[in-house]
Amino acid sequence: MRPAARAALVAAALLLASVALASSGLIEQVQDKYLRTSSIKASFVQKTASKAMMVASTARGTVFIKKPGKMRWDYDEPEVQSFVSNGSDAWLVSPAERRIYLYKAQSALASKTALMFLAGSERLDRHFSMEVAKEGKESFTLELVPKERLAGVMRMSLRVLRRGLFIRSVTTVDRLGNTNTLTFSRITENGFIPDSMFKFEVPEGFTVERQRLP
């Protein structure tokens, strides 16, 4: 092999190694930050699209996340609803229907799986293969593929802001090609969120229906 060709191969190998190290570094930074984060409050816009039905919808509200394992999603649009989870059970509250749908938290949170690591103490790379798929000046995108079959999830992507390493959006794609994108703004980390926000008592006049998801 000619010296010039050998030098080019070495340079290419070093370049690939540096890219891999940089990608690994970004992933580690995101995971380390959220392992140290105790709570999150943010406004959100949720957009869902059904590939088969060719139907899209948009919802808005506020999310509260607190370790260990607590989440609350208060929807303001298109109708007032609350989704509350204490880590083991989850309740979808529909004031308009005066009904409460009770789920086991794990089965009900498929569309929010990527955010569950924010509410717990586990690393994402324990459950997902991860890579940096796109880099920009202000943000980068992490692509995640489950290492084992995960209900409702074929792949996910996180768009992360470089400044502060805030997760700006999460997109989940299921095995039918349906997408669910959550975009966040007005993000507050490590603020006080009372545990009472994740406790639930059935209001008078509401019907409770226990649900099972596949």
Image (spheres, rainbow, N blue to C red):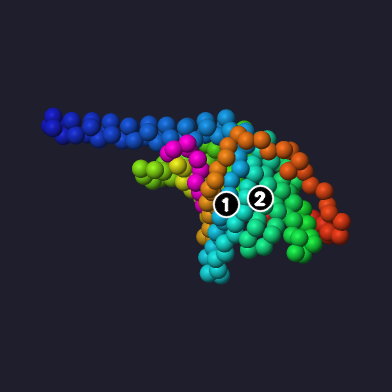
Residue, disc 2: 73
Number of marks drawn: 2
Q: Amino acid at mark 2?
A: Trp
Of residue 89 and residue 16, the one placed in the foreground of this image is 89
Above or below, comparing residue 181 to residue 25 in the picture:
below
The answer to whether residue 129 is seen in the rendering is no
Above or below, comparing residue 70 to residue 109 in the picture:
above
Image spot of residue 108 (x, y percent): 68, 51
Residue 4, by quadrant, is: top left
Magenta segment, which residues? 162-172
Is-magenta flag for residue 14? no
Q: Residue at x 43, y 45 (%)?
A: 141
Image spot of residue 20 (x, y percent): 37, 35
Q: Amino acid at mark 1?
A: Phe
User: In this image, 106 relative to 3: left or right?
Assistant: right
User: In this image, 193 relative to 57: left or right?
Assistant: right
Image spot of residue 118 (x, y percent): 59, 38
The answer to whether residue 100 is seen in the rendering is yes
